[in-house]
Image (spheres, rainbow, N blue to C red):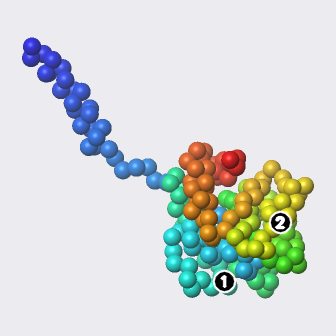
Amino acid sequence: PHCSFSADIPLISLCFRALCCKGPPPPRPEYDLVCIGLTGSGKTSLLSQLCSENTENIVSTTGFSIKAVPFQNAILNVKELGGAANIRKYWSRYYQGSQGVIFVLDSASSEDELETARNELHSALQHPQLCTLPFLILANHQDKPAARSVQEVLPSSTWIYRWRLWPVSYTHLDVYKRQMERAFSVAAPRLWNFLQWRLD
């Protein structure tokens, strides 16, 4: 009758180890992205909200800034570059080492500004240091009355396999972040797989 007690000791020990002796969780992989777009497209505000920072006194980035954007299964180290005309000509100096690109467009901007943004996007897609990287394109300010649809922002005929175009607004940023976290939850080791998700 006492044999069962001694036989259970290893099982108890295993259970104890499983419950009480777990090591620290493995570190989340980190990836370096560059975030570009014209001044006023909302790059700084979007990144600040994704980092749960105060956005009351946001000012446009004049040079560059770096933010670590946390997700459940990864950390994105995002280098945001200022979007003024006198700064855009220096963007390429900061591309080295990037593993992906976030391009933010103002979907409620004037047609002239939107065309300028399209041209900058086209140049970035063709740049030697970015031409093989995945692009996440955000059509921002979708909550504004003058906002264009994603089809109007970038006609579908210009899409290529490296793009993922996503409508976004500050008022629905929580939904946007949850969708991104769901995409990262099935991420493979390489950033390429991180950004090649399918929209539901």
Q: Residue at x 53, y 58 (%)?
A: 71
Circle 2 is placed at which residue position?
A: 153
Q: Which of marks 1 and 2 is in front?
A: 2
Residue 102 is drawn in which quadrant?
Answer: bottom right
Cα gap from disc 1 to disc 2, whole angstroms: 22 Å
Report helix, strand or loop for mark 2: helix
What x and y, as percent, mark residue 164?
74, 55
Q: Residues within 10 Å of mark 1 (few under 14, many from 20)?
A: some
Circle 1 is placed at which residue position?
A: 60
Q: In this view, does 59 lie to the left or right of 68?
A: right
Q: Is residue 141 left or right of residue 9?
A: right
Q: Which residue lies furthest to the top in this view?
A: 1
Query: In this view of the protein, which residue sits in the foreground, 42 or 160?
Result: 42
Report helix, strand or loop for mark 1: loop
What x and y, as percent, mark residue 181?
57, 54
Amino acid type assigned to the residue bearing label 2 in the image: Val
Q: Residue at x 72, y 59 (%)?
A: 166
Q: Specify the quadrant that holds the N terminus.
A: top left
Q: Which residue is drawn at 22% across and 32% down?
A: 13
Q: Residue furthest left?
A: 2
Q: Which residue lies furthest to the front in this view?
A: 145
